[in-house]
């Protein structure tokens, strides 16, 4: 049964301790998860939708699991290096999978809103957590089941009907990779009818000595006419790997933006699943990856139009250099009797080196005729004409290349609905391209010499 | 300033330029005319270093330097400017960022500090006036969504910003209505001085009514086959290119 | 548009897309059918009946043994009922003793059949100057123009005959583009293939006429397993056409063909298909199960292979004409129109495998779904790391005519170097109501307007067909679409 076995064995031996350090509403799911895992394996490379990514292999090493919730040593100041200038957020920090609040957490937050440790919330408000936890993430997915089996804590963002959260909530995930460890992370977001909220999640790695792995399951419920933005910025290290499964359930008239940005990572596999369950809902699903070295980024999306008159618009862009491997697979499903559906999916990629590889699989499956659907995928290179035009104006080759790569990413960044974050992202991407992301304060990233542009291939 | 000597060049293995000779001195305006496919645009591409073209023979000296050994950007820094026949749209790159990168790269090449933001914006404003370029255009992405006329004006605006020694105008008149043509030509004339030179590449004589050439060259089958004064352009306008073609083809036969 | 109008329109569309299959007659001629079932003896029987050499029998047996270890593929977007492979007869031959020498010798019933198909062999010979090989129930019954072609060194005959007359050529190329182990249906075909066409164009020869094969399934309870092998040697050119029809029967019939094409240096092959196997009735009863493996090996530098297909028939279509572009500067093309109606299911597309440098490919696919049909495009464009400067462009559109039909697009793009450019664009929409209204306002009925719009939509592909075929294909689309025309 591949890599799963060690985790199931681990659960069987440690279930009492796992339960004791979690909460009943979370423990309630474990038995079902265990049953769901019966006879299953984690996906292997080559299976459908896993053409280039071996999830099983990612879970195969013998990682440490912090089952008795020992606080890990981490410099909290480290978290602030990804502070977005001029943007005040309600900040929460997770070290591994231990969640804690910062000094800004909950400050001036409406009283009816609950943001914080999922475990604590499950004890204080069991009815809320029990109502939503595990309801959207499908246990049919072996990774989700594994996460549900072992996750002990997480972040809860609960915004009741009609409440508008003015400031974004920010979660900073820190992996302290001084040892070979893994984290089972969980995020549950409930934005009830007419409410509005935004969540910004930033992944960082503090030390880079060892491989580490994050398993993450995100469940998002967005009620009727509610609005929710989710930004996920991965800026870890080349030894930090991640498997993430995100599920969005949208009621009628809701409006959701999901943006997954991979600036720096080891191997990442992100699944995004959006379900439209009421009419006139809208989703913007965005993604971006800048990869070099031996980085590996695989995004899989599934948007199910199960209700009429919904709109989805999906855009993923990759720049791949060196030996980077990129993959995108996406499906738009329009169920029967869902007229007035509009769905567009686009995946644009640039391979910037002879050994970079891209695998893309955009899919449409449509069972209703009154639709406007399309998809496009390209794998190519920078516009050579534009490059020459810029050089004739005196812009050096490397600078012109950087400018074009940044420009290539600009429509993904421009879709961000938080002004300060958008500016910050433009800046981060610029730094990523010119190689100076490594100069971040205290940064543990091994992105020295990782510029996508310090080659002397002056063609 | 520019000395082109027996220049041969090919694209995709096909020889287009078959021995071009040309000398341009400061203060001069040269017109290069010729029928379609004679190699006019190839000449401009080779002078600016377009990687799609291969130089197979000859030399080009620019202000005492071997031009062909320089990268496209260094040629620009040395003072060569090409107004493209079809300016490229570059979505996502704003005109301001683009121009600042270009100008500061040139300054760096010449050992100068970058312009401050306010000086740069002042310069932009000043030079925009040369071709009456709208401020809105200057804040958009490079050439994106510009009309044909706006693109050509934008080319001349960039020329004004970069103050080249040698400007090559490649079919700058194509696709322009008479008003736009007047504005563009007016811009070019404003920028003319004793110290710089211009090569006007055109199929028609029309543009030469506005930008008066000192010399007119006819390029045919990859060679300059005739050189004369401004009257040559008028004769070409009147009689077309057939008589030259005949003359040359007969000579060769 | 108000509701009444909408309903009326739906009715008209219903009417327009419902028409009867006009090729559904059965020809009453003697057929020799062997008992149902498949085992090694059947394979040996077929080989023996055709008087085949040892090596070919061994090829068949290897394929059969491989097939026994394989499972029927289920990855396609098709709802395939269980097929009992032992309930099919694997060999049916019209009882014509030997290949006829002239038209007079051809069984009159058989000739009538081809007349009904609109391909009177004599007419074809006289008028269009097209060489025709007619294959009925897996056996080639007549090849025209053979002598004339022979003068140029062009070989065009049934594959059975080629095995006897040109064993070395067949042996050299058979199974090269489609190995017997390629897939379940390819293995089955390799074991039991009965006949088909063989074409060899020698070095430097441009075949002066279109070569054409008409395939007809006639006998009941049989499967058809023909095999076509086309070889274009250096600098050769050939345009090849394939047409297919079958009688209307309540039960489903299996068709599992192989087409192999080898294209050498600077050679060019155009392969056009108008596939009109019986699609089943309005309720989805009967119809051909069409599982076809078509692949071309562009192994020569500057070689070119162009697939054009108009698919209107079959209850089930599983078909991906592909190009392996291993020659430098080789070119692959795929142009397809697939129209599905009633309960038809089609899963069709192409693979372009770029192995040679500077190889280029173009894919244009137009799907039209009506009735309760399901129509899928499935494609793969793969650029290997050493295949530098490759270029692919794919345009893939789907048109939905009814709310109960489905249109699906499943492309895969895999690029392993920086200098290649691959583009895929796809759209799915219903027929444009503004266009319909515009036609209505000009006095064109909705039924005719749909025909016009669909033909316009498919034009880019139809224009790639040779003239004779284009006309037929256009008619076919109209027949499928318009009750009044059919």
Image (spheres, helix red, strand yellow):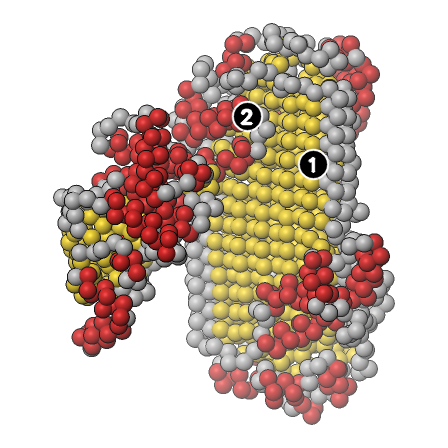
Label 1 secondary element: strand
Q: Looking at the image, which residue is at 51% across and 81% down? A: C208
2 vs 1, front mark = 2
Quadrant where the C terminus of chain B is found in the figure:
bottom left
Query: Is residue C27 positioned above or below A170 on the image?
Result: below
At x 17%, y 51%, the residue is: B28
Give a yes or no on whether discs 2 and 1 share a subunit.
yes
Q: Is residue C258 visible?
A: no
Dividing the picture into quadrants, the one containing residue A301 is top right
Circle 2 SS class: helix
From the top left corner, tell me how far across and down residue C156 is, in percent.
57, 78
- Which chain is disc 1 placed on? A
Q: Residues within 10 Å of mark 2 (few under 14, many from 20)?
A: few
Q: Residues within 10 Å of mark 1 (few under 14, many from 20)?
A: many
Closer-to-camera residue (A92/C22): A92
**Residue at the disc numbered 2:** A419
Placement of C136 over or under A201, stated as above or below: below
Where does the image place residue C467, in percent across and percent down from the top left?
Answer: 59, 76
Asked where in the image residue A60 lies, by quadrant, the reply is top right
* Residue B157 position in % (x across, y down): 33, 42
Name the residue beneath numbered marker 1.
A282
C309 relative to C39 in the view: left or right = left
Q: Residue at x 54, y 80 (%)?
A: C209
Q: Residue at the spot x=62%, y=43% of the render?
A: A345
Residue A180, above or below C306: above
Task: Compute the Cα span from label 2 to label 1.
Answer: 21 Å
């Amino acid at each position: 049964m591949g890599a799963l076995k060690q985790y199931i064995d681990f659960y069987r031996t440690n279930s009492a301790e796992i339960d004791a350090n979690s909460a009943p509403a979370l423990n309630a799911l474990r038995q079902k998860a265990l049953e769901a895992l019966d006879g299953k394996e984690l996906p292997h490379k080559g299976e459908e939708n896993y053409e280039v990514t071996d999830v099983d292999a990612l879970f195969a090493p013998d990682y440490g699991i912090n089952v008795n919730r020992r606080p890990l040593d981490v410099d909290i100041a480290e978290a602030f290096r990804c502070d977005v200038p001029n943007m005040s957020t309600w900040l929460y920090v997770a070290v591994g999978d231990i969640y804690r609040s910062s000094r800004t957490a909950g400050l001036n937050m409406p009283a009816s809103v609950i943001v914080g440790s999922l475990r604590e919330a499950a004890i204080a408000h069991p009815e809320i957590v029990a109502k939503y936890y595990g309801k959207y993430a499908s246990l049919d997915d072996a990774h989700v089941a594994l996460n549900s089996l072992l996750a002990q804590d997480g972040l809860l963002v609960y915004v009741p009907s009609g409440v508008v959260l003015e400031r974004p909530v920010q979660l900073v995930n820190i992996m302290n990779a001084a040892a070979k460890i893994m984290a089972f992370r969980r995020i549950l977001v409930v934005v009830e009818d007419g409410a509005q909220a935004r969540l910004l999640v930033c992944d960082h790695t503090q030390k880079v000595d060892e491989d580490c792995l994050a398993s993450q399951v995100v469940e998002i419920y967005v009620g009727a006419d509610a609005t929710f933005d989710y930004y996920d910025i991965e800026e870890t290290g080349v030894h930090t790997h991640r498997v993430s499964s995100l599920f969005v359930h949208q009621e009628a008239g809701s409006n959701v933006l999901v943006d997954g940005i991979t600036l720096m990572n080891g191997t990442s596999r992100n699944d995004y699943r959006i379900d439209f369950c009421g009419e006139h809902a809208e989703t913007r699903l965005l993604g971006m990856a800048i990869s070099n070295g031996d980085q590996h980024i695989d995004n899989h999306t599934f948007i199910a139009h199960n209700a009429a008159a919904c709109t989805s618009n999906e855009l993923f862009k990759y720049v791949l250099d060196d030996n980077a491997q990129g993959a995108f697979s996406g499906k738009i499903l329009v169920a029967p009797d869902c007229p007035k559906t509009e769905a567009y999916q686009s995946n644009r990629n640039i391979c910037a080196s002879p050994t970079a590889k891209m695998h893309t699989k955009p899919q449409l499956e449509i069972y209703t005729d009154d639709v406007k659907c399309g998809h496009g995928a390209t794998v190519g290179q920078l516009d050579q004409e534009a490059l020459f035009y810029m050089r004739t104006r005196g812009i050096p080759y490397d600078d012109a290349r950087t400018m074009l790569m940044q420009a290539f990413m600009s429509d993904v960044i421009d879709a961000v609905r938080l002004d300060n974050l958008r500016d910050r992202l433009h800046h981060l991407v610029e730094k990523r391209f010119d190689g100076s992301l490594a100069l971040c304060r205290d940064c543990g990233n091994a992105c020295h010499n990782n510029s996508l542009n310090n080659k002397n291939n002056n063609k | 300033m520019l000395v082109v000597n027996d220049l041969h060049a090919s694209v995709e293995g096909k020889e287009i330029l078959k021995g071009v000779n040309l000398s341009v001195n400061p203060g001069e305006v040269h017109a290069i005319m010729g029928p379609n496919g004679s190699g006019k645009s190839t000449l401009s591409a080779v002078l600016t270093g377009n990687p799609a073209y291969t130089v197979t023979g000859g030399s080009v000296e620019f202000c005492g330097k071997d031009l062909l050994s320089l990268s496209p950007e260094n040629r620009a820094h040395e003072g060569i400017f090409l107004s493209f026949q079809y300016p490229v749209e570059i979505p996502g790159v704003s005109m301001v960022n683009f121009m600042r990168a270009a100008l500061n790269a040139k300054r760096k090449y010449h050992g100068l500090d970058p312009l401050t933001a306010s000086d740069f914006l002042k310069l932009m404003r000043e030079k925009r006036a040369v071709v009456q370029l709208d401020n809105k255009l200057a804040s958009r992405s490079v050439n994106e969504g510009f009309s044909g006329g706006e693109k050509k004006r934008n080319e001349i605006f960039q020329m004004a910003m970069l103050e080249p020694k040698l400007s090559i105008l490649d079919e700058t008149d194509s696709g322009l209505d008479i008003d736009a043509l007047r504005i563009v030509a007016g811009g070019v004339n404003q920028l003319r001085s004793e110290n710089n030179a211009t090569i006007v590449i055109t199929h028609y004589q029309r543009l030469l009514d506005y930008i008066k050439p000192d010399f007119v060259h006819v390029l045919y089958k990859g060679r300059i086959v005739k050189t004369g004064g401004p009257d040559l352009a008028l004769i070409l306008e009147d009689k077309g290119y057939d008589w030259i073609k005949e003359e040359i083809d007969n000579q060769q036969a | 548009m108000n509701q009444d109008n909408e309903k009326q329109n739906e009715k008209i569309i219903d009417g327009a897309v419902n028409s009867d299959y006009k090729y559904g007659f059965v020809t009453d001629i003697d057929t020799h059918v062997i008992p149902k079932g498949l085992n090694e003896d059947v394979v040996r029987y077929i080989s023996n009946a055709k008087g085949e050499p040892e090596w070919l029998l061994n090829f068949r047996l290897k394929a059969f043994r491989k097939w026994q270890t394989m499972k029927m593929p289920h990855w396609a977007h098709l709802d395939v009922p269980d097929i009992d492979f032992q309930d099919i007869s694997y060999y049916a031959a019209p009882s014509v003793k030997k290949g006829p020498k002239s038209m007079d010798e051809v069984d009159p019933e058989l000739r009538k059949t081809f007349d009904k198909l609109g391909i009177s062999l004599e007419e074809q010979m006289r008028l269009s100057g097209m060489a025709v090989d007619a294959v009925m129930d897996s056996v080639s019954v007549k090849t025209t123009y053979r002598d004339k072609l022979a003068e140029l060194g062009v070989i065009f005959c049934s594959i059975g005959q080629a095995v006897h007359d040109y064993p070395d050529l067949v042996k050299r190329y058979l199974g090269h583009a489609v190995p017997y182990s390629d897939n379940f249906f390819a293995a089955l075909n390799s074991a039991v293939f009965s006949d088909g066409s063989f074409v060899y164009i020698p070095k430097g020869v441009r075949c002066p006429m279109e070569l054409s094969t008409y395939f007809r399934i006639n006998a009941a309870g049989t499967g058809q397993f023909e095999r076509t092998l086309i070889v274009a040697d250096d600098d050769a050119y050939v345009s090849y056409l394939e047409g297919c029809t079958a009688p209307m029967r309540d039960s489903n019939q299996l068709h599992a063909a192989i087409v192999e094409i080898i294209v050498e240096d600077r050679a060019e092959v155009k392969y056009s298909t108008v596939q009109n196997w019986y699609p089943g009735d309005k309720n989805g009863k009967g119809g051909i199960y069409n599982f076809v493996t078509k692949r071309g090996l562009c192994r020569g530098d500057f070689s070119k292979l162009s697939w054009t297909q108009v698919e209107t028939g079959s209850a089930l279509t599983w078909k991906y004409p592909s190009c392996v572009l291993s020659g430098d500067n080789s070119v692959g093309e795929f142009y397809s129109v697939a129209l599905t109606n009633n309960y038809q299911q089609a899963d069709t597309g192409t693979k372009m495998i770029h192995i040679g440098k500077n190889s280029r490919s173009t894919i244009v696919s137009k799907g039209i779904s009506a009735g309760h049909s399901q129509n899928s495009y499935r494609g793969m464009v793969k650029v290997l790391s050493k295949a530098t400067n490759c270029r692919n462009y794919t345009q893939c559109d789907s048109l939905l005519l009814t709310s109960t039909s489905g249109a699906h697009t499943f492309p895969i793009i895999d690029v392993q170097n920086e200098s290649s450019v691959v583009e895929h664009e796809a759209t799915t929409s219903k027929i444009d109501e503004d266009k319909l209204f515009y036609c209505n306002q000009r006095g064109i009925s909705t039924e005719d307007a749909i025909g016009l719009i669909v033909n316009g939509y498919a034009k880019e592909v139809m224009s790639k067909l040779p003239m004779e075929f284009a006309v037929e294909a256009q008619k076919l689309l109209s027949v499928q679409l318009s009750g009044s025309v059919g």
